Image (cartoon, rainbow, N blue to C red):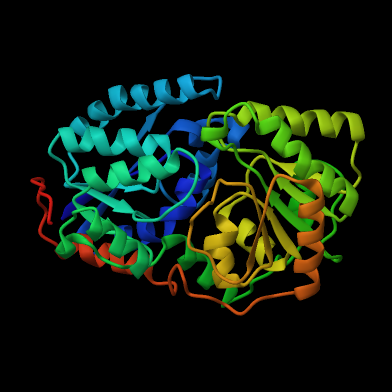
């Protein structure tokens, strides 16, 4: 059996690979190894490890690799700490292949460590375009990876144009869409809002009225501007005064600036229409996206999963600049008037047709099948 090692470093990481983990664990020729680290271990980012274990997965190793501070320097140091710790884990687990997920800083540490140890690297969600430092990390990991699992043909073409062997590029779709398809095709809405009241802090939110789902993360290449940026979004929410479910930011550099702006707004304004959450189980987040009147912020989720759902989306700022998107997305600057106008326009429009831009719901199975059968090689060459 081939041992396939997956590192989960954040809530986004987990949602981006969960369906593939299930398929790998169920495959007769594969054995899943799980490493959990970075912000996935921290309570202030929602203790994603608890969600992972509640889903029935067991961590083979846990890696503490976050240097507190959420600055560019601490993000670089966290990457370095991961590069120090992960080789010990890989030396112990001895995987046949390591999956590096997406484009976060822990993804870079994973790919570098495995590559230096002559362990083949499989990379998901490569070949895409976006803003922030993720753009650079994503393509750097592509050059370290030996097996590529892009979400669509456009991304695959970019990977090949980067000099990768076309025989190693497998268009599988996005594993995040697998979960969306599964949920939407069954019961795509929350059966009860009781869970929302038990978790989070702030106003009581009912799902009976149209509500907004807001998620705003740092733009690392615009470090220092986060508080000003989130203030524009919060001012727009204050004008709209709709029931709002809002997530705290991820662990990237600039996170504290955004969190500070949110805390000030919450303490000074005491909004009776916003409830704040650290984290959601993936299934809950998808159902909220499927039920909300409009998704707002700069997360990739409304562009990826949201395309499949058709959720009206207002994408704010440059974090997703250049990323493939469906008709459900309207782009605006960090400007309260633009945000308000776009949200009202999107709510008036309503749901968009489902778009399979990022896959049809079977990415996990395809990934597992490729990993079970493909020739594993560690020597790379440019193919142009």
Q: Is residue 241 above or below residue 353?
A: above
At 51% from the left and 71% from the top, the residue drawn is 182
Q: Compared with residue 196, is residue 327 higher up or lower down, i.e. above or below?
A: below
| Relative horizontal placement of residue 110, taking residue 299 as reference (left or right) | left
Where residue 159 sits: x, y (%)?
Answer: 27, 57
The residue that appears at 19% across and 55% down in the rendered structure is 164
Residue appearing at x 17%, y 63% in the figure: 166
Residue 340 in the image: state x and y as whole percent. 81, 55
Q: Is residue 19 visible?
A: yes
Number of marks in picture: 0
User: Would residue 253 appear left or right of 361 to someone viewing this image?
Assistant: right
Residue in the foreground of this view, choosing between 227 and 120 = 227
Dividing the picture into quarters, in which one does residue 230 lie? Answer: top right
Q: Identify the residue at image location x=10%, y=49%.
A: 381
Work out whether 300 lies above or below 133: below
Residue 234: x %, y % from top left:
80, 42
């Amino acid at each position: 059996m081939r041992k396939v090692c997956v590192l989960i470093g954040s809530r986004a990481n987990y949602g981006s690979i969960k369906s593939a983990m299930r398929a790998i664990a169920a495959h007769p020729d594969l054995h899943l190894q799980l490493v959990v680290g970075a912000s996935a271990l921290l309570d202030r980012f929602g203790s994603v490890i608890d969600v992972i274990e509640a889903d029935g997965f067991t961590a083979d190793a846990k890696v503490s690799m976050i240097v507190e501070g959420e600055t560019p320097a601490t993000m670089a140091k966290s990457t370095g700490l991961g590069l120090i710790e992960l080789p010990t884990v890989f030396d112990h687990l001895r995987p046949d292949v390591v999956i590096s997920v997406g484009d976060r800083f822990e993804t870079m540490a994973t790919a570098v460590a495995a590559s230096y140890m002559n362990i083949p690297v499989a990379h998901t969600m490569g070949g895409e375009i976006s803003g922030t430092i993720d753009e650079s990390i994503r393509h750097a990991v592509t050059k370290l990876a030996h097996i590529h699992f892009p979400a669509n043909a456009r991304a695959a073409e970019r990977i090949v144009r980067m000099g990768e062997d076309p025989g190693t590029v497998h268009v599988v779709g996005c594993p995040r869409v697998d979960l969306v398809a599964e949920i939407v095709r069954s019961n795509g809405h929350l059966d009860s809002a009781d869970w929302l009241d038990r978790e989070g802090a702030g106003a009581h939110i009912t799902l009976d009225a149209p509500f907004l789902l807001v998620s705003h993360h740092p733009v690392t290449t615009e470090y220092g501007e986060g508080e000003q940026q989130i203030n524009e979004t919060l001012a727009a929410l204050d004008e709209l005064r709709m029931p709002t479910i809002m997530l705290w930011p991820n662990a990237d550099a600039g996170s504290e600036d955004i969190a500070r702006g949110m805390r000030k707004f919450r303490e000074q304004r005491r909004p009776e229409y916003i409830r704040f959450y650290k984290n959601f189980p993936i299934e809950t987040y998808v159902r909220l996206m499927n039920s909300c009147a409009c998704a707002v912020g700069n997360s990739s989720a409304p562009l990826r999963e949201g395309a499949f759902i058709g959720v009206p989306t207002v994408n704010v700022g440059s974090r997703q600049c250049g990323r493939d998107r469906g008709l459900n997305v309207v782009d605006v600057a960090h400007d309260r008037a633009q945000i308000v106008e776009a949200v009202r326009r999107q709510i008036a429009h309503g749901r968009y047709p489902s778009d399979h831009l990022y896959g049809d719901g079977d990415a996990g199975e395809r990934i597992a099948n490729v990993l079970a059968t493909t020739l594993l090689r560690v020597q790379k060459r440019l193919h142009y």
